[in-house]
Every structure is written in C-alpha cells, then in structure tokens.
Amino acid sequence: MTTHEILARAKAAKPALRLANTTTKNNALQAMADALVAATADILAANEADCARAKGVISDVMIDRLLLTESRIEAMAAGMRDVANLPDPVGQVLSRVQRPNGMVIEKTAVLMGVIAIIYESRPNVTSDAAALCVKSGSACVLRCGKEAWQSANAIVNALRKGLAAAGLPENAVNLVEDTTRASSMELMTAVGYVDLLIPRGGAGLIRACVENATVPCIQTGTGICHVYVDSTADQAMALDIINNAKTSRPSVCNAEEVLLVHSAIANEFLPKVQQLLVGDRAASGKQPVQLRLCPRAAAIIPGVPAGENDFDTEFLDYILAVKVVDSLDEATAHIAAHSTGHSEAIVTGTDAAAAHFTAAVDSAAVYVNCSTRFTDGGEFGLGCEMGISTQKLHARGPMGLAELCSYKYIVRGHGQVR
Amino acid sequence: MTTHEILARAKAAKPALRLANTTTKNNALQAMADALVAATADILAANEADCARAKGVISDVMIDRLLLTESRIEAMAAGMRDVANLPDPVGQVLSRVQRPNGMVIEKTAVLMGVIAIIYESRPNVTSDAAALCVKSGSACVLRCGKEAWQSANAIVNALRKGLAAAGLPENAVNLVEDTTRASSMELMTAVGYVDLLIPRGGAGLIRACVENATVPCIQTGTGICHVYVDSTADQAMALDIINNAKTSRPSVCNAEEVLLVHSAIANEFLPKVQQLLVGDRAASGKQPVQLRLCPRAAAIIPGVPAGENDFDTEFLDYILAVKVVDSLDEATAHIAAHSTGHSEAIVTGTDAAAAHFTAAVDSAAVYVNCSTRFTDGGEFGLGCEMGISTQKLHARGPMGLAELCSYKYIVRGHGQVR
C-alpha cells in the first residue's frame, strides 16, 4: 500500500476517534495490549528475522535495542495498560470565562487529528506511540527504520486487531510500508493529512524535518546538556550530580555532555572530578569517562585537549567536555551559544545565583541542585512520554498526553450578536 | 541595513529583555506611547508621502486603511498604554508539582525570543505588534508592505526612542528595510534568529509561509466561517445571528461566508433570509447581500447560482453562499470539507444537536446560538490580540500575550539524582 493511501486511511479514521468516549478508548487500549501478548509468537518470529538481517549491518548495541523477548513484549503490553489508566486529556476544560454579555467561553482540549511519527529501531516505540495517540484521540501513522520493520509490522497487526475488537477503526494505527527516504519526505509534506509530525531520532533526522517539513512538526531529543558548578556549590553534592548525569545512562538525551566549573574552585574541584570519573571508575572495573579539557582545565588535571567541536557534540558516550569559566554570566553565555535547549543544571549555594541561572538559561528544563537526568515524562509525573521537545512552540520538555492535544474554544450563548 | 543585520540586532536584544522586570517593560510601553504622540508631525508627513505614492496603485479602501490622522495616532498610543496595564505573562507559574523525592517542578511561562511579523499596510499593526512583543518580553522584527513603509519607519523610530528612554535596548523593535519578497523569504528561513514567525495577511502569504518557512510559524486569519441553522432553531435568533455575522463587518476574518440550512425548515426560513439580507437592506439604502445558492436553495429563493468555488472562498464582502442540508451530520461533513478552521456556529433549540456540533466541528471557535463575529482577543477577554490562529499547534483562535510566550520547567532540588 502506498504511503498516500495509508495517510488517507488514517485521515478517514478521525471522525470516529473524535466521537469516541473515554471508556471506548480505554477498552481499546486493553484489547490492544491483549492482542499484543496473544501475538507473541508472530512478533518474536518477525523480530528474529529483523535481527538476523541486521547482524553485521548495525552495531551490537543497536541490535540489543532491536531485540524482543517474551518479557519485553509483556512489558510493552503493561505500558499500554498504564496509558489506559491515565486520565483522558480530551475534553478537559482548560479555562472557562463568562463574558459580560452572558456568553460562556470554554477553552477545551481536543485531539490533534493524525500524528505521524518517524523513528528508528526500538520496537517498544511502536506500541508506546500507538497507545499515546489512541488515548489522546489521534490516529497515528508510524514510520520506523527498515531494520525494525518486520517487528513493527507484526506489532501493528496485533494492535489493529485489538482496535477492531473494541469497535474502533483499525486504521487508527498504521505502519508505513516504504522504509526509504521517500516516505519520510512524504510525511513531512502531507499538508491536509498530517496534523502533527514528531521525528524521534538523531540530529540528521531533526535537521531534515526542519528543512523540509511543511506540516506542523515538533523537534525532539537532541541534548547537549550542561552542568555548571558555581563557586558556592556544595562540592560533594556537585560530584554526586555530575556522576549521575554523566554515567548513569550516557546514551540518553538528558545525560550531561559538558561540565562548566567556576575558576574560583577549579583547582580544588577538578581533581575530585577526575578522581571520581576516571580513577575510581577504572579501579572498580567500570569504563572511565574520557575528559576533554579546555586549556585552563588541562592545566589542572590530565585529560584530552578539547577539540573544536567538543563543546557542540552530543557524545552519548563516556565522554565529558570540561571548561573553566570566570563567572555565572560566562557560564550562561556559553550555554546560550552551545546548548540544544534541552536540560541544564546549576549547583550552587546561593539563591541569587540560582535565580539568575534559571532566568537567563533558555532551555526546556533548568535545574537547581539536581541532576539533568530527571527530564523525562515519568520523572515529571506525566505518567508517560512521547519524547522531549527542544523547541519553544506548543510543547517544551517531556511531552505527555496533554501535549499531544490541541484545544478549541466552545462558546455558548442565547442569541448574542456583536 | 541588511535584513540579516537587523535579525542579528534583534537577537542581541534578547538577554536584556529576558532579564527585564514588569515595571521596566511597562515603563517602556508608556515611554513608547509618549514618543509616538510626540512624533505625530513626522509620522503624518511620512504617511502623507506613503498615501500620495499609493494613490491609483492600491484601492481606495486600502488607502483608507493606510491613512493616519492625529486621532488615529492617539488611538495607537492609547492601545499601547492598554497593553502596559495588562498582567505580565512572563514568569507566571502555569503548574507546580512536588515530586516524591522532594524536587519541586514549576512549569513557568517564558518569553519567546525574537518574533517576526509579516503584515500589510495598516500602520496601527506596527505599534500593536511592537507593544505585544515588548510586554511579552520578545524582540520583534517587523516587515510591512512597501506602500506603508515610510509610515511604519516613522512609527518605529518613535518607539525606539521610547525604549531607549526607558533603558531597554532600542533593538527590541526593528523594521526590515527591504520590502521585496527577498526579505520575507529571509525571515521565513532565519533559523537561529527567529523564534516565531507570524504572517498576517491573505491566503497567498500564509501559503508561502507553509511552503517555505523553516522557522516556527503560526498561520493566522483566513476565515471561511459557517453558520448552520438546525431544524429546531429559534428562527428570529438565527436571523439576528446571520445578519450580524454577515453584515456587521464583512471585510474581517470572523465574518460569515457560508450559510447552511436544514431542509426541514428551508422553505420557511430561506425567504426570511432573503428578505432580511437583500430586500430590507435595499429598501433602507444599504448594500444588499448577494446570495450564491446551491440548487435546492435556488429552487426556493432568488439569487445567483453558486459556482464551483463559492463554498471555498473567503469573500470578505457582501456575498453569502447558501446551501440546504438534510442533517446535522451533512452540515458538519460540509464544514470539515470546506472550512479553514476559524469559526463556525450552530443555531439550534436542542442540547443534543449543540453537543454533537461542538464535538464534531474541528475549528478554533465553535459557537452555539451566537455570532461568529466574537472570535477576537478583546471579545474573549484577552485584552488584546496579535491575530487569530487557524492552526492546531501552540495557539488556536485569538492570540493574546499568553500565546506569545513559551514555557520552561524550573526544577529545584537539594542534591537529587536518578
């Protein structure tokens, strides 16, 4: 089936989804979870074929991300049931005002329509994204990487059976068949069909969407996150936060990539950083962090001299760029010039520095004395997440169900004219 | 000065605006209003030159829109003082949650950054847009039509004096010097400089932005607005609403362009519509409304047969397309196929029909028993308006100060790690 035909089918599912109530949608999510588990054998067979084909083509880390097991499929189903148990965002009255002429104006959350999602190889994104779209009343058009297509197809087939069993159109969830660049381009330019495009992937995909998308688009996920250690910081706390932000999961977008240290404490503090991230880790058999140092930091501790791009790179690895700055203003100016607008933290002992940092730094999440790793829908209490928006329009930071909705004004009167 | 230089100057004004408090911004707005009035002679001279050059080039209606007088300049200044008196949207805490680990997460409204506005010839847009941007903490880059450039330039020069007098960077308000298509294209693609682009103009400008913009953009203003008269409607109320929506100001985007009438009442109701909009108006010396009729309506009342495009045209004139439908579902299906998503109304006597209409119609404002003409920032109680968004992302319907802001999460802890 062509991508255009799939888009037309998704669009045609909108009216039924618009009129579906909360119970219908929740029943559908439960039925989709049931169908997913029931299709375990088919899904594992498809996944095995994907993994066999991908071996040697993509890295072992990527293959591990692609690999499904019975328990991973059960976890995907459990995730869908969790979404069923979240409050329905659609129909929430966001504000209500009665005007002097008696008209009542309600700003009401409504579904987006058709949401297209371009992603890579993690099969659980398929069921997560489908669940979030169904719960928020939108049809979805999923476009995964070719190395994961058979797995995604088996998953989508199961989900569509669940939808049909619950009386919702199976075309509420769709998988694009074409995995070439052409289908991505078609989704980016499907004006009148796609109400929202969410690219989930690396910087190249995001850039392609910015350059080519004519449909509304939310950029997600690229994180060059900074931790700034102020001269007044509790240094033990700062070490804890740096260690957590850098090493607890280096491959994710909320991991720290750059450490900024105030020059007043650099001589005392940087050797502790080096000890913690390099010496202690090596001694306990963990992979040490490679430090890429500005010239002033390099005069204090051993490490690799930072190259031209090291302060503009999302390493997603055990690598940390380190720079010494002379002031809070120099830190915020460096962040303004090099951040991707995802998450930044200050460690400080003074409220004034905290207030200045949170006012001056223009990122989705700005932390005072805690780790950047908290930028996550679950950690923020949203219960779920479609991705982390790094743009300023519509949604910023973790995108939950509310951020997948639009709103409209419903105005009730009894004959008012202007 | 090149457009790129102007963009760079606006971007450089961001840090000062980000740290400006409410008093500073309000004082600046008062100083800008003072400076505007003080520059009346210069502004009128520039406007006279614009009008002289435009005579014979643009229509008399457009020249009237362009024309400034002393009292119009005073009204512009009063508008700026009104904006000064509105609450500051920046820094508002939109939601606050304390997580189980003790972290406090505040979702906080923040300024957008640099807002570019492409508009046509109404000089008051220059001062209105500048005031809304300054109040919401953003620098603005204004790009007006060439027939209004001298007027806009004189106005912007005055506003910049006011900014400087109040201690804010004069580059918070900027006018693009180049009025060719090249400068519009440059604004649409100024990634890294323009945080939000708002095109205010006709369908051609909006389409050009959709096709070319790589910066975040909000589509505004095109309104093919429908009034649907249900079989159960109070017909006197319906006539009032139709008359108001069509004839009170036909040139604006919230005016009615299409009337849908249920077939059960068409024989009785359509002659009343014809009497009111054609006969009565002609008898009292007002311009009659031209009715463009579907075949079923044409079998009941006199009028012009509707052509192929009449149900897809924003007339902005004393013209109304009329169609007879057999059901509420036919009405909402027609609206789904032909509306621009601006404003639609139902006139009905039953709650069930009202509920179905408001659920099924996917437009920015959906009215029950009142006129579409209320879609307006002032009428909605926002106190001001930058335009009417017809898109679903970020802002929908009238855009006030809140809609010109983004938000960020400020997270305060005491050493929490994940």
Image: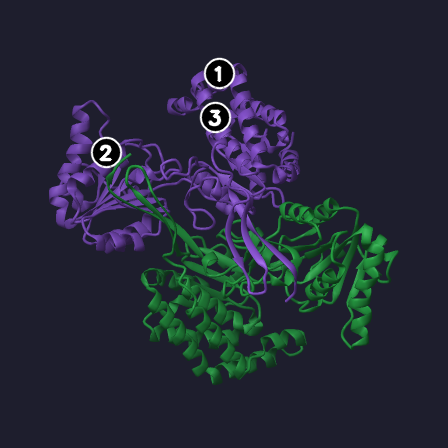
Chain colours: A purple, B green
- Structural crowding at the residue carrying mark 2, measured as other residues with C-alpha within 10 Å and reported as few (<14), some (14–19) or many (≥20): some
N-term mark: 1 or 3: 1
* Residues at marks 1 and 2, CA–CA distance in whole angstroms: 36 Å
Per the rendering, the mark at residue A290 is: 2
Residue at image mark 1: A48
Question: Any mark on residue A362, and which?
Answer: none
SS of the residue at dot 3?
A: helix
Residue A291 coordinates in the image, percent (x, y) = 22, 36
Host chain of mark 3: A
Q: From mark 3 to mark 2, how far is it between C-alphas?
A: 31 Å
In this view, B107 is above or below B24: above
> Residue at (57%, 57%) from the top-left corner?
A104
Above or below for B145 versus B204: below
Residue B6 appears anywhere in the view: no
Q: Residue type at mark 2: give it.
A: Gln
* Chain of the residue on which disc 1 is drawn: A
N-terminal-most mark, 1 or 2: 1
Q: Position of residue A352 (x, y in %)?
A: 22, 55
Q: Is residue B340 left or right of residue A140?
A: right
Q: Is residue A122 left or right of residue A277?
A: right
Chain holding disc 2:
A
* Mark 3 vs 2, N-terminal side: 3
Quarter holding the C terminus of chain A is: bottom right
Q: Pick the residue in front: B295 or A145.
A: B295
